[in-house]
Image (cartoon, rainbow, N blue to C red):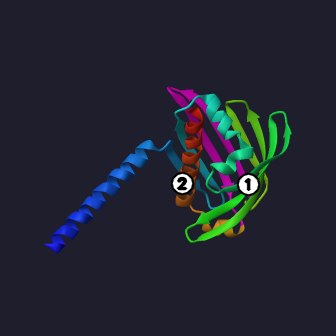
Amino acid sequence: MQGFVQACLRTCLLVGCCGWAASAAAQSPVRSVDVAYDGDTYVVTAHMFAPVSQSIAWDVLTDFANMAAWVPNVRQSSIVKKAGNQLTIEQSGTAKFGLLSFSYTSVREIVLTPQTTIQSTQTKGEMKRQQSLMELSPEANGTRLQYRLELEPSGLASAVISQDRLKHDIDEQFTAIVGEMVRRKK
């Protein structure tokens, strides 16, 4: 009888976990994340949906001074220089890779095309090269976000970054960012 009860409990737990995972996946703002690697450079392409207006999405994506409050791996974020639609931002935080973690600092040049694109190029940091482009466009009941990241790791980062790790991190970060967008919508 005890074995039967334990088997029932395991089954209930498994069904509950599967239901929770399906529910979490259904609510994720990340529609797809593809990562390619050519031996030197990772290229990430991600498609997301935010159930908010394009102006709210833009406000959150460009709120560099406050990103540490909602982006999981960012500890500090500040605007170092601003000239029109060009910014220099500095961010620091902790990147976690399983049991390993290391602190990072990144300085990036940002070029804004209001409410449509955010172009970012690392000028100082732990990566050999890092460039990204975020594109925003209206979609029924919200905003479509298309993100492309080119990343050439160096040093310790090249030993721990993987395609699976990048997919996980992109999903985690943009789930948090879209969560902030939804919070601001209310």
Q: Compared with residue 47, is residue 128 higher up or lower down, i.e. above or below?
A: below
The extreme bottom residue here reads: 2
User: Disc 1 marks which residue?
Assistant: 76
Which range is magenta?
A: 128-154
Q: Main secondary structure of the magenta part?
A: strand
- Looking at the image, which residue is at 80% across and 34% down? 85
- Is 102 drawn above or below residue 79 in the view shown? below
* Image spot of residue 130 (x, y percent): 71, 53
| Circle 2: element type | helix
Furthest-front residue in view? 186
User: Foreground residue, 71 or 124?
Assistant: 71
Mark carried by residue 167: 2
Tell me which amino acid carries mark 1: Gln
- The picture places residue 43, in percent across and down from the top left corner, at 61, 51
Residue at point 41% right, 43% down? 26
As drawn, 67 above or below 93: above
Q: Nearer the viewer, residue 96 or 156?
A: 96
Residue 115 magenta-drawn? no
Side of 153 relative to 22 (left or right) = right
Q: What kind of residue is marked 2?
A: Lys
Residue 136, given in percent of the width and then of the height, sits at 62, 33
Quadrant in which the C terminus appears = top right
Quarter that holds the N terminus: bottom left
Task: Tell me residue 21's x, y (percent).
Answer: 38, 52
